[in-house]
Image (cartoon, grey):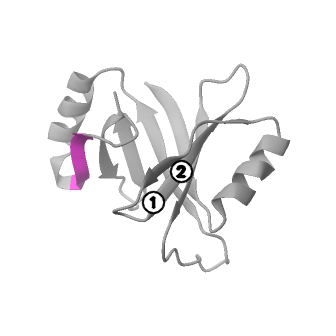
Amino acid sequence: MGIAHVALWAHDLEAVCAFYEALGATRGPRYDNPAKGFSSHFLSWPGSAVRLEVMHRAGLEPDQDGSAGWAHVALELGSEAAVDRAADRLRDRLVDGPRWTGDGYYECVVLDPEGNRVELTA
């Protein structure tokens, strides 16, 4: 198991992606889900398996500090079966899934004891 990606919300998706590109990131293709008003890009850096997911949705409200806010950390579990087993063990903390997402991940989302979102991916 390891960190697959970390996600953050952005009011201006393109500007935030450009900022991280200036820090050496390569931007992946844009994913759009018009039904949810959601768009995202994954960014990666040479030599690192961990990616950054920058996400935007219509009506996004700022956090108390004015930022859009960090969204979640995603942990790579290695297989669909491992995600299913984790979802069963953490059923009382399960928020969503397990399911295939529109951008190609098999995942479930659980809350840690402080209420932070954790994506468990295959």
Q: Residues within 10 Å of mark 1 (few under 14, many from 20)?
A: few
**Of the residues shown, which amino acid type is indicated by label 2?**
Ser
Q: Which residues are magenta?
A: 93-99
Question: What is the x, y in percent for residue 84?
Answer: 19, 32
Q: Quadrant of the N terminus?
A: top left
Question: What is the x, y in percent for residue 89?
Answer: 18, 38
Q: Residues within 10 Å of mark 2 (few under 14, many from 20)?
A: many
Q: Can you identify the residue that label 1 sits on?
A: 38
Vertical comparison of 116 with 2: above or below: below
Taking the magenta stretch, the answer to whether it contains residue 54 is: no
Q: Nearer the viewer, residue 90 or 22?
A: 22
Q: Identify the image quadrant of residue 83.
A: top left
Q: Is residue 30 left or right of residue 35?
A: right
Vertical comparison of 80 with 102: above or below: above
Under circle 2, the secondary element is strand
Q: Residue at x 53, y 51 (%)?
A: 40
Q: Main secondary structure of the magenta part?
A: strand
The total of numbered circles placed on residues is 2
**Of the residues shown, which amino acid type is indicated by label 1?**
Phe
- Pick out the residue farthest to the right: 22
Q: Nearer the viewer, residue 118 or 68?
A: 68
Label 1 to label 2: alpha-carbon separation: 7 Å
Q: Identify the image quadrant of residue 108.
A: top left
Q: Identify the image quadrant of residue 117.
A: bottom left
Disc 1 + disc 2, Cβ < 8 Å: yes
Q: Residue at x 84, y 44 (%)?
A: 22
Q: Can you identify the residue that label 2 sits on?
A: 40
Q: Is residue 41 left or right of residue 79?
A: right
- Pick out the residue farthest to the front: 34
Q: Residue at x 36, y 53 (%)?
A: 112
